[in-house]
Amino acid sequence: MDLIPSFSMETWVILGISLVLLYLYGTYSHGYFKKLGIPGPTPLPFLGNLHNYRQGFFNFDAECYKKYGKTWGLYDGRQPVLVITEPSIIKTVLIKECYSAFTNRRNFGPVGFMKKAISLSEDEEWKRIRTLLSPTFTSGKLKEVIK
């Protein structure tokens, strides 16, 4: 009874190359933040930092805030995610530079009629919806609603 199957040498080479390519595919995006000098927790192949969420989103984010400061990078699977907690940078991203560089958010897949929501729409559709909604939420109108 053999513990290792008796495959031919070609089969072992193909299997080895396939495993190496699979590993490279699962980890190639994981150097993105390191190249930019942004700190963050070490991701796992294919899973990224999803395993860290076992302790809960809040606990994981609080731990990262203590360890890495106000900005850090993590990975949802192979997708890089930049976490920003500095209010001035958040304002720049969401308000000032929103039309040029930061139009798209996380893609959660098809969600029926909610696909046209401002938080899920992308590119030109997002710009159109934001242009329509922006005058509605001015500070003066929001103060009226609160009173």
Image (tube, rainbow, N blue to C red):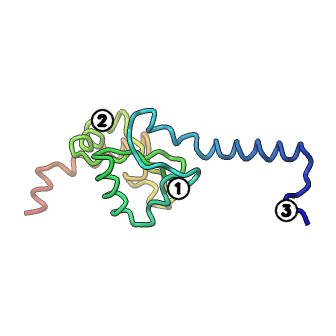
Other residues around mark 2 within 10 Å, as few (<14) / some (14–19) / many (≥20): few
The dot on residue 109 is: 1
Residue indicated by mark 3: 3
Horizontal placement of 57 versus 135: left or right? right
Horizontal placement of 101 versus 110: left or right? left
The dot on residue 136 is: none
Residue type at the position of mark 3: Leu
Residue type at the position of mark 1: Gly
Q: Earlier in the sequence, mark 3 or mark 1?
A: 3
Residue type at the position of mark 2: Glu
Q: Are marks 3 and 2 in contact (CB under 8 Å)?
A: no
- Name the secondary structure under disc 3: loop
Quarter of the view holding residue 93:
top left
Of 123 and 1, nearer the camera is: 1
Q: Earlier in the sequence, mark 3 or mark 2?
A: 3
- Name the secondary structure under disc 1: loop
Q: Position of residue 2 (x, y in %)?
A: 89, 62
- Name the secondary structure under disc 2: loop
Quarter of the view holding residue 88:
top left
| Residue visible at 42% across and 40% down in the picture | 124
Q: CA distance from mark 1 to mark 2?
A: 25 Å
Q: Are marks 3 and 1 in contact (CB under 8 Å)?
A: no
Q: Nearer the viewer, mark 3 or mark 2?
A: 3
Quarter of the picture containing the N terminus is bottom right
